[in-house]
Amino acid sequence: MSTEVTRATFNEVMVPNYAPSEIIPVRGEGSRVWDKEDKEYIDFAGGIAVTALGHSHPTLVNIMREQAGQIWHLSNVLTNEPALRLAKKLTEKTFADRAFFANSGAEANEAAFKLVRRYAFDHFSPEKNEIIAFNKSFHGRTLFTVSVGGQAKYKEGFEPTPAGINHCDYNDIEQLKAIISDKTCAVVMEPIQGEGGVIPADKEFAQQVRDLCDQHNALLVFDEVQSGVGRTGTLYAYEQLGVTPDVLTTAKALGNGFPVSAMLATEKVANSMVAGTHGSTYGGNPMACAIAEGVIDIVDTPEILSGIQERHDLFKSELNNLNEKYNIFQEVRGMGLLIGAELIDSFAGKAGGFVSAAEKEGLFILVAGPNVLRFAPSLIIPKEDITEGFARLEKAVIQAIENTAAA
């Protein structure tokens, strides 16, 4: 027997760390979602860059059903076939030799940050423990990952946080040169900052970061939790930068909504994580790994990856058309289907109003901070859904402009 719940139930039973919309989606298919009142929405948000193959993808549904009839969970005192197959595919398709599985991007990053310190401990000295990351970066919500992340607001009220972490501005190599030293064990960066405003790394900057790491015997960690699994038009974004990291983290789209993540590393680095140094009860879960293997098989094909750039061009064209009509964006930027539209100064801090207006028109979009609209739809979103979604977004833009003028 099911229990009837409403949005008001959230306020009664949930910890108030979220402020969800008033609607409750109940089903989805492809890039369309329906709520409890059967109102339809077009999904340009993708569960924050997660549902890369849309909702209820038939192949993934079948994989889940098949695995559910076999085995759901095993502790890590045993391995399992789906985990081994997934690890084999990820290492064959990337720079990495070894994989560690967890459940979320934060957990993959936690493992990565522990690994780089352990590697420096093993190969150099305990004093080589400093991590450098970038302002505006986002790496998760554990105490370690919010400390590495470059947004002070996520640490407020939780201090003291782990020490030995420094930050500098993204795409500013001179700042990095000024703080990197022989005490640096790793530099951590997103190939494209997602939460920080959808800001891609300059190719030259990324290459210089790699060079500095090599000069100081520091490891390079790429956080591809949001940019990975085809999001930018290649399986992983590092492929487009001409830079190979030592460690890479991946999550979000890897399970298309089923919780799974991975830390990938070279054999030399991975060997520092010996038995007993780290673990995860659900990491390598056979159900999660079976689904993730299906996602990789579908995404890493020429048909899917080539279609991402076509959809990117269509999104940018539609956003530029909106801007020509209403003059609301100062810049449209991004890679693949991770796109940000930064509002002009007169709409500074108003991004949330555009999201609310879009929802009323039957469209899901995101923000990346208070000034940037973020778009991270399914990688296979039909072009007719893009066209219809932008028709709805135009109505939302008109409403948001009117609301701002009236405020």
Image: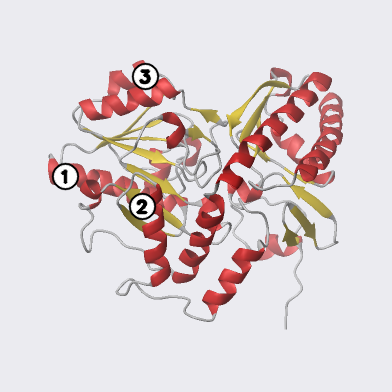
Q: Quadrant of the C terminus?
A: top right
Q: Considering depth in this image, is 185 or 162 the residue closer to the camera?
A: 185
Q: How is the image coloured?
A: secondary structure
Residue 370 in sight in this render:
no
Lower sequence index among marks 3 and 2? 2
Instruction: For residue 276, say whether it is visible.
Output: yes
How far across and how far down the image is residue 370, in percent?
64, 32
102 vs 294, left or right, is: left
Q: Which residue is mark 3?
A: 173
Q: Residue at x 49, y 70 (%)?
A: 287
Residue at image mark 1:
121
Looking at the rendered image, the disc whose residue lies closer to the viewer, 1 or 2, is 2
Q: Tag on residue 91?
A: 2
Q: Residues within 10 Å of mark 3 (few under 14, many from 20)?
A: some
| Mark closer to the chain start, 1 or 2 | 2
Name the outermost residue toward the front.
Answer: 302
User: Mark on residue 196?
Assistant: none
Check disc 3 and report its element: helix, strand or loop. Answer: helix
Q: Amino acid at mark 1?
A: Phe
Q: Position of residue 342 (x, y in %)?
A: 66, 25
Relative to 121, is 186 above or below?
above
Front position in the image: 66 or 347: 66
Q: Quadrant of residue 347?
A: top right
- Amino acid type at image mark 2: Thr
Q: Earlier in the sequence, mark 3 or mark 1?
A: 1
- The answer to whether residue 133 is left or right of residue 67 is left
Which marked residue is nearer to the observer: mark 3 or mark 1?
3
Q: Residue at x 63, y 51 (%)?
A: 47
Q: Residue at left 53%, top 32%? A: 196
